[in-house]
Image (cartoon, rainbow, N blue to C red):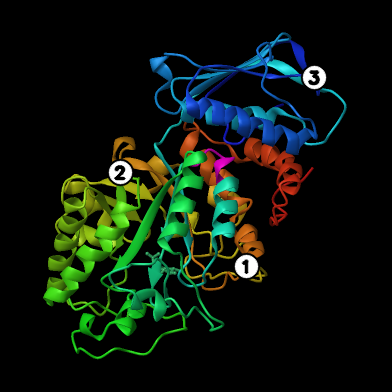
Amino acid sequence: MLNLIPKPASILFDSGEFVLSNLTGIQVRSSNQEVLALADYLSAQLQHATGWNVQQSNDGKIILELDEDPGLGEEGYELVITPESVRLCANQPAGLFYALQTFLQILPSSRASTLSLPAVSIRDTPRFVWRGAMLDVARHFFGVEDVKRYIALIAHYKMNRLHLHQTDDQGWRIEIKSWPHLTEIGGSTQVGGNGGGFYTQEQYKEIVDYARSRYIMIIPEIDTPGHTNAALASYPELNESEEAPSLYEGTKVGFSTLGANRAITYQFLDEVIGELALITPGSYIHIGGDETHSTPVEDYKTFIKRIQEIVIAHGKNAIGWSEIGAAEILPGTIVQHWVGKSYQDAKQQGAKIILSPASKAYLDMKYDSSTPLGLDWAGLINVRDSYDWEPADYIQGLEENDILGIETPLWTETVLSMQDIEYMTFPRLPGLAELAWSPKGQNWEEYSQRLGAHGKRMQAMGINFYRSPEVDWE
Ligand code: TNX
């Protein structure tokens, strides 16, 4: 049993084993800079896992290679372990990165003087291109080091998107040089008081670069036209009344809105999105669009159309929460389903859908009634609940082809520290990552055994995870 998560598309066992020791080297059969960087990444990971200093050498038996194999696509890989060598191969560096993750999971979770790895041939490609997590850094702020750790952890499960919910009623977290009060005033608070914080553009770039090295695209969100109290408190002219409200440190939703009929609102959005687009190499800007209970319906439609045009004018595609399905959806816009049925209107307009059903994928829901953190408005979500659903069947009226993938959001009204983040995320995220990566046909009984074996790995990574009684932890 290899106990891999996500489970690969195909695993064929062979006879014999490869013996890994502190004399094993890494051989890079490529001059590609990214592949060379991946060899360094592997050395560091092996050092962490085994204590050995496994370096690059011309006759190293762990072989990294790019190979034209169209069947592997952009992210697929092959990992072949024989008694003679370990060969990791992909079309693209991203695939090699995933081959490395699989290889690292094959290593025993405890240290020894030599490690025996079973001969095996794995060929693996993802089911969905969108395999994401979302972190709300607005309700509570989390600094660069926390975000990097989150990226490193989700990358082990082959996730490739991190959506940062950067603005909300309680805080504005990204420096915008042309509108400095957003962070000076709007960034100073968070839920429950005790300060706030924000990323300078340099820090944001640092996050983006780190994520890139883990093959993760950062998706920045500027939530509009609701969830904007922090911006409205920073600039009176963004309010229909031209009066700035007070800063807000509670947890209500739906009370704020940008003035949808004001020219200054669209100048503001153009400048904010313009600055953000320049420091975001990914193709998307998330525009929010959720819970706009204070925006008149016709204004909302006008607003959503205009903000999509602004995003497109800055060379990106827009993503919005389900509710934007009620407005005109421009070509290329993606809709993120969380509750309700408006994804069907979006589908009819040709949009692709990201699945984040609150009752399955919301990491801020409690596991059970005794969970000390979290909310329960979408139900209690234990580990089995978050894993045991089939994406193409669970959401009515969507075909496989309408679904871009899965994203698992962590809202942070009750989440205060990295410890809290890990507790709510693990061990639900690995299961959601598997739904996004592995072929259809998951089986809870079988998965829960693999997850049980992962307890030691999560422990070795220092993850503060919830030891659900549903799982038999090794
Ligand atoms: C709903 S999900 C929200 C968030 C809250 C979350 C809490 C979504 C698009 N909006 O504003 O933080 O519930 O679970």
Residue 72, numbered label: none
Residue type beneath disc 1: Ser
The local crowd at label 2, few if under 14, some if 14 to 19, many if 20 or more residues have their Cα within 10 Å, is some
Local SS, label 1: loop
- Which of the 4 image quadrants contains residue 246? bottom left
Which callout, 2 or 3, points at the residue further toward the start of the chain?
Answer: 3
**Element under disc 3:** loop
In terms of sequence position, does the residue under pointer 2 or pointer 1 come before the other? 2
Ligand 1 position by quadrant: bottom left
Read off the residue under disc 2. Answer: 398
Task: Tell which tag, 2 or 1, sits nearer the viewer.
Answer: 1
- Calculate the distance from the C-alpha at mark 2 to the C-alpha at mark 1: 37 Å
For label 1, the residue is 417
Q: Does the residue labelled 1 lie within 8 Å of ligand 1?
A: no
Residue shown at 20% from the left, 63% from the top: 270
Quadrant for the N terminus, please.
Answer: top right
Q: Quadrant of the C terminus?
A: top right
Whether the residue carrying mark 3 lies under 8 Å from ligand 1 is answered with no
Q: Which span is picked out in magenta?
A: 154-159
- Residue 364 shown left or right of residue 275 in the figure: right
Which x, y percent locates residue 260? 16, 75
Residue corresponding to mark 3? 23
Task: Categorize mark 1 by other alpha carbons within 10 Å: few (<14), some (14-19), many (20+).
Answer: some
Q: Which of marks 1 and 3 is in front?
A: 3
Dots 1, 3 in contact, CB < 8 A: no
Give the residue type that dot 3 points to. Answer: Leu
How many angstroms separate mark 2 from mark 3 (CA)?
52 Å
Task: Residue at 39%, 37% (x, y): give it.
Answer: 129
On the question of residue 42 being in view, the answer is yes
Instruction: Specify the amino acid type for callout 2.
Output: Leu
